[in-house]
Image (spheres, rainbow, N blue to C red):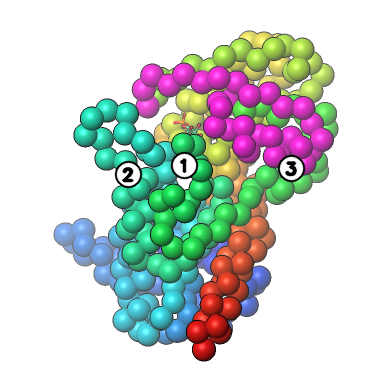
Amino acid sequence: MPGCEQHAARLAARLAPRAVIHAELREFPDGEIYVRVDGHAADAVIVSSLRAQDFLPLAFVAGGARDAGARRIGLIAPYLGYLRHDAAFRDGEAITARHFARLVSSTVDWLATVDPHLHRLGSLSEVYTIPTAVARAAPAIAQYLKTHYRDVVVVGPDAESAQWVQAVAEQCGAPSIILAKTRRGDRDVSVTLPPPEILRGRTPIIVDDIISTGRTMIEATKVVRAAGGEPPVCIAIHPVFADAAVEALRSAGARAVISCNTLNHSTNQICVADALAEAAMSLHQHDDDHHDQRG
Ligand code: R5P
């Protein structure tokens, strides 16, 4: 899909497909989408991150691929959106995580993604009805940290981040601390102060799965600095960056802002293609076995 060319090329180098096809998409003057998939394969894999605006183009490309003879379509989505609203907090609220999963499950046959935002959901299979596989960014983040920094402490800005923070800290052999976040609105959050002693003599590395408005990272950066910590390195698995958050983070005292390449962004420094290809292969292989059994 447009915007995913680099990822498709990196994954193709690992998955060795027969061909890499660049789907052609353009907008008509009224905003409707023109789609052309120039090529055909019984077994197709679409590479597309799924932010809010990406689903309809994906559905049309999958439709085009099926029109051209695809019997099986896998989706490699480095970023899988619509997982944060996984419960109704007020009467009448749509649980969009569930509804989005239903749409994606009716469009493709399997899904591989990187660290989906699972908070109240135990696994993707609670909402997705197709086979799914999850690639972990923690090994690539830990490798990056071991190469570039010494004596780090890994900081999680909220309870949900514990799953990523603890994995990164363990793989770096570093201590970690999880802070508590209160969110009062989309851009109104506060984070508790970390104990100063854990920060002493170490470079704080704040790790979260998503940076959207940046408010969570900004507040975490401020409290780390307020507790006497060194300027922290802020790492996001998914650089959504809904607002101009990079400058705001630097102004708040961040030493560096770094992300994994699940979405294209100027902060991309950590490549998750290996883990993603491995996750995709596990499903592809599984599907092959399944087909073989059915003869
Ligand atoms: C939510 O729990 C996520 O893990 C992130 O902390 C959140 O999406 C970040 O959003 P923002 O950058 O808007 O504070």
Give the CA separation, mark 2 to mark 1: 13 Å
Please indicate, yes or no, whether residue 111 appears anywhere in the rendered image: yes
Give the CA separation, mark 2 to mark 3: 32 Å
Disc sitting over residue 142 in the figure: 3
Three-letter code, disc 2: Thr
Is residue 269 shown above or below 11? above
Ligand 1 lies under 8 Å from the Cβ of mark 3:
no
Give the structural element (helix, strand or loop) at label 3. helix
Give the CA separation, mark 1 to mark 3: 25 Å
Where's residue 204, x and y in %? 71, 25
Name which residue lies at 37% across and 53% down.
101
What segment carries the magenta color?
157-186
Name which residue lies at 36% across and 22% down.
185
Is residue 233 shown above or below 226? below
| The one of 91 and 164 positioned closer to us in this rendering | 91
Three-letter code, disc 3: Ala
N-term mark: 2 or 3: 2
